Image (tube, grey):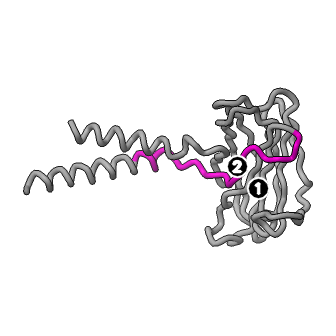
Amino acid sequence: MKLLRLFVIAALLSLTVTAHAYVTYTITSDGVPDAGYSYWALVYSVTNTTTQPVIELNLYFDANLYYALYDYSPMTGWDTLNTNNTPYTPLDEFPYPSYIQYNAIATGAGIAPNGGVETFSFKAAYYIGGAPGGEAPQNQWYQTFSDTSGTPLVSGYTSVVPEPTTYVLLTISLGVVALARRRMMGKQ
């Protein structure tokens, strides 16, 4: 019974790892690399866990790694603005020396507080081998806003949503460790 309880707890913990992530995304290859670029389809989910609505979202892409963003599929009820892939140099403290910005502004109520979720997507051209992580794009810096004051509501780095098999493997491995421990304890 203890083993089953441990297994259930491990499964729940593995599922809650991403439950608190604010901006997550999935990534899939979108074509054969050419001329030093790889192409990727990015699908984002923005979850508003705050008590205020989100009315603006900014994603920042390191211009040393990303060449262009294109083929936008915006959130419903949002206007998507982009910098036409022209790199900007930040004026204040910022994680990148220059960046390409994806900007979306709500035309209505925005993302509801306390668990509201919106999804959008676009594609990106990425410099092959541009980052220590390899050829696939890395996490991006983001900011969300609940009003027009210019003060971010939430900011941080996006996170990739692992494939479901990652959670299954984690849960199984924790169960195997618990079973092995139980057997070892029984032999003493």
Q: Position of residue 53 (x, y in %)?
A: 76, 32
Q: Quadrant of the C terminus?
A: bottom left
Q: Could you tell me the amino acid type at mark 2?
A: Leu
| Left or right: 135 as drawn, with respect to 126 | left
The answer to if 53 sits in the magenta stretch is: no
- Residue at image position (37%, 46%) is 171
Question: Which label was assigned to residue 42?
Answer: 2
Nearer the observer, 121 or 45 = 45
**Residue interval drawn in magenta:** 148-168
Determine which quarter of the picture holds residue 95.
Answer: bottom right
Q: Position of residue 44 (x, y in %)?
A: 69, 44
Q: Determine contact: label 1, label 2, CB under 8 Å.
A: yes
Q: Could you tell me the amino acid type at mark 1?
A: Ala
Question: Which label was assigned to residue 124?
Answer: 1
Q: Position of residue 36 (x, y in %)?
A: 75, 71
Q: Position of residue 107 (x, y in %)?
A: 88, 31
Question: Which label was assigned to residue 22?
Answer: none
Nearer the observer, 115 or 129 = 115
- Residue at image position (67%, 52%) is 158
- Real-space CA distance between mark 1 and mark 2, rounded to the nearest whole angstrom: 7 Å
- Under circle 1, the secondary element is strand
Q: Is residue 62 above or below residue 167?
A: below
| Left or right: 187 as drawn, with respect to 129 | left
Q: Is residue 25 above or below residue 111?
A: below
Other residues around mark 1 within 10 Å, as few (<14) / some (14–19) / many (≥20): many
- Residue at image position (88%, 66%) is 89
| Left or right: 118 as drawn, with respect to 86 | left
The answer to if 165 sits in the magenta stretch is: yes
- Under circle 2, the secondary element is strand
Other residues around mark 2 within 10 Å, as few (<14) / some (14–19) / many (≥20): many
Determine which quarter of the picture holds residue 157.
Answer: bottom right
